[in-house]
Image (tube, rainbow, N blue to C red):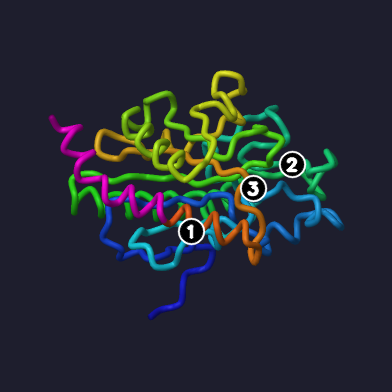
Amino acid sequence: MPDRPAYAPLLLRPDAPAPPVLSLPHSGTRVPEFLACALRPGAEQRLPGCDAHLPELLPDDLPIAAVVNPYVRAAADVNRSPQPQPGGPRTNCLFPLDGTDGAPLYRRRLTPKNVELRLARIHRPYHAALEQMLSDRVRAHGYAVLLDLHSFPADAAPGIDAVLGDLCGRSAPQEWTARLEALLRAEGLRTARNALFPEEQQPPEVVGGYILRRHASERVYAVQLELSRAWYGAPGTPCFAAASAALRRVLTALLAALPEMRRQKDR
C-alpha cells in the first residue's frame, strides 16, 4: 500500500459498505510544521482545545467508514467556511489567532500565502475525502448518512449528555434526527436538539455546522452529534468503556433501522 500523502486526513474503514460516514473534524492533536514554526514560544500549550478521545471511543469493528482530521484545529478549522472574514473574531473561527488565554498565537500576522497553504493542505483535503466517501455510498445505496461527531465540556450544557444538530431540519429529515435521539435516550443519555450553539446567536465567522451545510443534500442526511466529555470520560476508565459500548449499541441499532427509515421517507 502506498504511503499516505502528507497532510491527508485519516480514513478509517473506507471500504465499509454501510450508508453512514462518520466525520471527526476536531479530534486532531498533530501540530504541522508550517504551524509550529509560526507560533510564538510556548504557544503550542495555548492552542484551542480538541474533541479529545473521540476516535478511541469508536468501536473498531463497526462497518462504518470515518474521516478524521489528525491536525489541531488551529491549523485550519474544517468546520468553518473557507472564506476568512477580515476583522472577524480572533478565536473559534477558520484560523484562530489567539490562544486559550486570549494572547496572540503567532509571531506575525497571517498572509494570503499562509491562508492558501492551510486551505490547500488541511481544509480542502478533508472535504474532498468526505465528499468522495459520501458519493460512493450514494451510488451504492441511493443515499448516505453523515454523522459529524464533536464533544463539549460539561459546563457548556449542564445536565445534557448529547446534543443533536440538523440545522433545524435543513440538513436531515427531523424524523431521522428524532430516531437517532430515541436510540441515544434508550441508552440513558440526556439529550437536546439544535441547542448547544444556536446558529442565530453567532456571527457568521464563528458559526459551526459548515460540514452539515456543505455536504447535506437530498440524498445525504447529515446530523451533528455533540457528546459531553463528562459522559464519556477518559480512556482506560470504566466510564469510557461503558460509553464506548453504548455508542456501539446506538450505531448498530441505527444500521439496522436505516432500511425501514429510508422506505418511510420514500413513501
Pointer 2 residue:
97
The three-letter code of the residue at mark 3 reads Arg
Name the chief secondary structure element in magenta: helix
Q: State how far apart marks 1 and 3 are (Cα).
A: 15 Å
Q: Is residue 251 above or below residue 228?
A: below
Q: Amino acid at mark 2?
A: Leu
Q: Which residue occupies 32% across, 45% down?
A: 145
Closer-to-camera residue (84/162): 162
Residue 41 in which image quadrant? bottom right
Dot 2 falls on a residue whose secondary structure is: loop
Q: Which residue is mark 3?
A: 229
Instruction: Provide residue 129's location: percent of width, then percent of height.
Output: 39, 55
Please give the range of residues in magenta. Answer: 249-267
Q: Is residue 237 above or below residue 202?
A: below
**Which of the numbered marks, if any, corresponds to residue 245?**
1
Query: Secondary structure beneath disc 3?
Result: helix
Image quadrant holding the C terminus, namely top left
Q: Nearer the viewer, residue 145 or 71?
A: 145
Q: Is residue 108 left or right of residue 16?
A: right
